[in-house]
Amino acid sequence: MRHADRVRRATSAFMTSLTAICTLLAVGILLVILAYIALRGIGSLSFSFLIDSPRPVGEGGGIGNAILGSVVLLGLSSAFGLPLGISVGIYLSEVGKGRLAGVVRFIVDTLTGIPSIVTGVFAYAVLVLPMKHFSAFAGGIALALIMIPIVARTTEEMLKLVPHSLREGALALGAPQWRVTLGVILPAAASGIATGAMLAIARVSGETAPLLFTAFGSRFFSTYLDRPIASLTVQIYNYALSPYDEWHAQAWAATLVLMTLILGINIIVRFLTRKRF
Amino acid sequence: MAHTEKHSDWRRVLSPTGNTGDAVFRLLMLGAGLFVVSIVIAMVIALASDSMLSIRQFGFPFLTSRQWNPIKGEFGALPFIYGTIVSSLIALLISVPFSLGIAVFLVEQAPHYISRPVGFLVDLLAAIPSVVYGVWGIFVLAPFLRVYVEPPLAKWFGWLPLFQGPITGIGLLTGGIILAIMVTPIISAVVRDVLTAVPESQREAALALGATKWEMIRVVLVNGAPGIAGAVILGLGRALGETMAVTMVIGNRPEISASLFEPSYTIASAIANEFTEATQDLYLSALVELGLILFLVTFIVNGIARTLVWNVTRKTGGVGRAA
């Protein structure tokens, strides 16, 4: 009996420390990855690297056009994805009832799980093929499709956090539902929706697969929406797979730039939402 | 009079108040919701119609043929299906125990001042883009595996066909490991939600009966089992469709071999790698058909996962452990 108890306690102590080790390892891997990006990236990072366009091997060059391209693509995808995603969120929280809303919610959730490469193939089929060439527009739409479900679900959740008394109070004053939603409920949830939008932008800024055959990539500065455009992620991909050490170094530096942006957004969002969690 | 009644009819259908502004507003929001549904339907139609050429040409044997030779015009998806399934299985095999450990530690053991920041760090793993994992994978992980992991595996387990063949660091095993790192934060996040939803009374009851901490945790895990299964399937869905990181480390060779050291190919990486090279219609159509397969499989897998997770977190929603 005593012995059995000791075994039980030892098992408990062993297993519970094993879970702590799992957690430590996961955090350790994160720190190792971030450390490699910082150490390998910092060497090639300079101001001219950030504003220059790519040059042939041995002549330096930079990622200025890729940064500009990413900004254009993110602007495009936000312009389509944010209003649509927020509208879908409003539908799910304020308007939709019953089975139809259930179907929409289910589709939105599964859309989150569709591989981004498939979204790229879809954008290629419906935008690139008819237009007959790669374009920033097709890339932006592909990214918007990835954004919509993320924004929709965070908007829905944030709207549901707004107390019912606020809705009832505004309706009791005689305001129609659309004024209540747009004038009272939406502003009350604005900060939550904004952080959701920022997270969606962070997520989309790291996407590569849907851009490979929509925005395609370019070695020049461009803001034309009907032509191929560069992006940080596709540039990183192409440079990392090239056979040149110099381009490998540039891929690390571009990765550092991308990760600074993404981690920055995530940490800002974390501080903004700390009260709520 | 009859005229205005007719008007209020369509408003009443759309809005209980019959207010014109409300009717328009509800119509617009409904339109946005239906638009998302129509996008998914459009995806199925577009992918199906663009892969028709390949479907007509090869039919069902497309899924069972091992020949992928664009020059000869032979297209069979089996090597990609094999690579996708095996790399995802390796990923789950490694990440599921880890994710469970992390979730149990954060929900059941760590005090709040530890579980919050550490939980955030684990979540950050999910914020790292696929292409960044790819860069780290080829320049850091692959050389590390080639020198420190694969030689011992070949030495001790070389009698298994799994660990035979040339050691390069690029192949199925590396792809599976990078996938494992990528899906761990996703699985552990969902398991955390599931464990949080398990009623506190279950823990108290177990402890009151004299259970040790670990025995109590086992009770909680059994209670959340369907949700945990959902989390694992959700991770599977993510692993099946993951593209860039895998493309960069798996070697991209459409062959089926028993060894995990050999290069392989996944459905997603075949599309990423060959789509812009596909100049003939049949080649492109075969790649789109791969996309259609991936779409359908992940759609079904995610549907199952969502249903499992929803059932658990809904049933016990509100009475679980305070997060």
Image: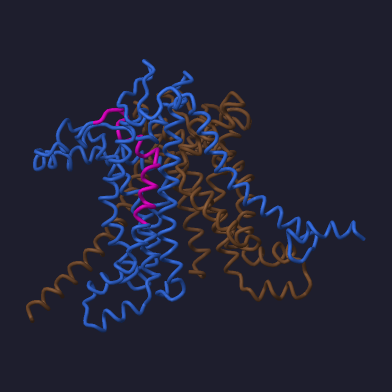
Residue drawn 30% across the image and 62% down it = B102
Position of residue A48 measured from the top left corner of the image (x, y, whole percent): 50, 35
Q: In this view, does B188 lie above or below A139?
A: below
Position of residue A229 measured from the top left corner of the image (x, y, whole percent): 56, 31
Give the chain letter for blue: B
Callout count: 0
Residue B251 location, quadrant? top left
Which is more toward the observer, B284 or B155? B284
Q: Is residue B316 above or below residue A129?
A: below
Magenta segment range? Answer: B231-256
Which is more toward the observer, B307 or A12? B307
Q: In which quarter of the image is the N terminus of chain B?
A: bottom right
Task: Kindly report the secondary structure that dominates the magenta region of the rendered protein.
Answer: helix
Furthest residue toward right: B1
With A117 as the anchor, is B101 left or right in this view?
left
Question: Magenta span has B126?
Answer: no
With A188 as the anchor, is A6 left or right in this view?
left
Position of residue A107 measured from the top left corner of the image (x, y, whole percent): 53, 51
Residue B224 location, quadrant? bottom left
Q: In this view, does B33 lie above or below A182?
A: above
Name chain A's colour.
brown
Question: Magenta span has B255?
Answer: yes
